[in-house]
Amino acid sequence: MKGVGNKLIIDIHSHLFVREWLPEEYWQGWARTAADKAASFLGAKPSYEETMKNILSPLWDPTGELLIGEMGKVIDKTVLLPQDFGFSQEAKVSIEEQNWKHVEVVRKYPDKLMAFASIDPRRKNCPEFLEKCIKEWGMKGLKLHPAAGFFPNDEKAYPLYRKAAELEIPVLFHSGPTILPYKSKFSHPMYLDDVATDFPDLKIIAAHTALGVGDLGGHGWWRDLLAIGSVKSNIMVDIAGWELKAMTHYDQFCDMLRTTMDELGAHRVLFGTDGPCFRLACPPQQYVQIIKELPQKSPKGIEFTEEDISAVLGENAQKILNL
């Protein structure tokens, strides 16, 4: 594996899209968002049926083969994140079976893939299920999506955090705005402050860095997250979903990434793609290349070292995953 020098390149944040694995309401929200984005490029908004057929259906990947092809010889390891959106809208496939299906895919490609577990903290016996996922199935962490309807600092979630801390695994939270029908207020990073404070040894990853990429003025939730993270050293962030910003507003992308590194330290920033969400616009290998070239191509006054890039692309993930 080539990686950066002799080091691995690790995508800490990716998904397998399979229609039956997530609620139909999720796909409806995803299709609405995708259609709105497509309209800005095409000049006309595709219908729901067209969006499902031409944009979403090509992303279905129950076996992981598309993902492995995307990784190619550039990305050495990818972490798969199941998504439990709670029980307000259940998928056709139970969350227990979804987790197991991710395990099966990982076992097909053990040198390339790992998986976190996902279990909504409001479900019965979630700490026991998490322990099974980690100890018996070999999963490596926990993925939570608060926008499904719970605040991260709800004490009902604390037994799950205690179990994660006991197992010494990272917990990755979706942070920042999210699509319909889910409510973004639950994913504001301020609610991670209580979690980080009450569980100082828990390894927390705030996904998408609160989606700061949506803040064209350079303000918003990502700055809230950095403010909290600057005094809570157990919070790390990933840059999954920042690809479009890197492609369309490169200077701002560089400025925001540099600011994030300055506030938290480069050792607390993780590379992620949020695949396959942005596959059509920016394939994962292209995003890796953008990051690799930052020391040479970042705008005047914004500097990145090779050490920064090595840390973000893989070294930090190796440490948090105990590889």
Image: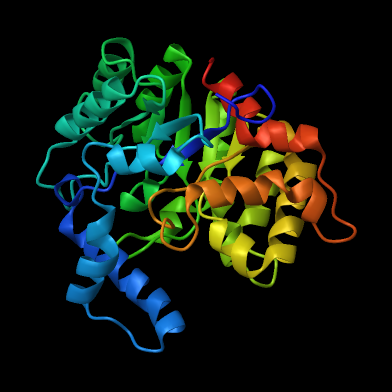
Name the image colouring: rainbow
Q: Is residue 162 left or right of residue 107?
A: right
Work out whether 320 lies above or below 259: above
Q: Is residue 235 left or right of residue 252?
A: left
Work out whether 60 lies above or below 234: below
Q: Is residue 32 left or right of residue 166?
A: left
Q: Is residue 303 left or right of residue 247?
A: right
Q: Nearer the viewer, residue 254 or 70?
A: 70
The quadrant holding residue 100 is top left
Residue 227, image x, y percentages: 71, 47
Disc count in the image? 0
Q: Is residue 267 visible?
A: yes
| Residue at horizontal 75 percent and vertical 43 percent from the top | 261
The quadrant holding residue 319 is top right
Work out whether 200 lies above or below 183: above
| Residue at horizontal 46 percent and vertical 20 percent from the top | 169
| Residue at horizontal 79 percent and vertical 36 percent from the top | 306
Residue 211, image x, y percentages: 54, 57
> Farthest residue in the bottom direction?
43
Q: Nearer the viewer, residue 151 or 79?
A: 79
| Residue at horizontal 45 percent and vertical 81 percent from the top | 41
Residue 85, image x, y percentages: 27, 47
Q: Is residue 232 visible?
A: no
Quadrant of the rendering where the N terminus is positioned: top right
Work out whether 259 lies above or below 308: below
Q: Nearer the viewer, residue 131 or 115?
A: 115
Residue 310, image x, y percentages: 70, 32
The quadrant holding residue 99 is top left
> Farthest residue in the left direction?
92
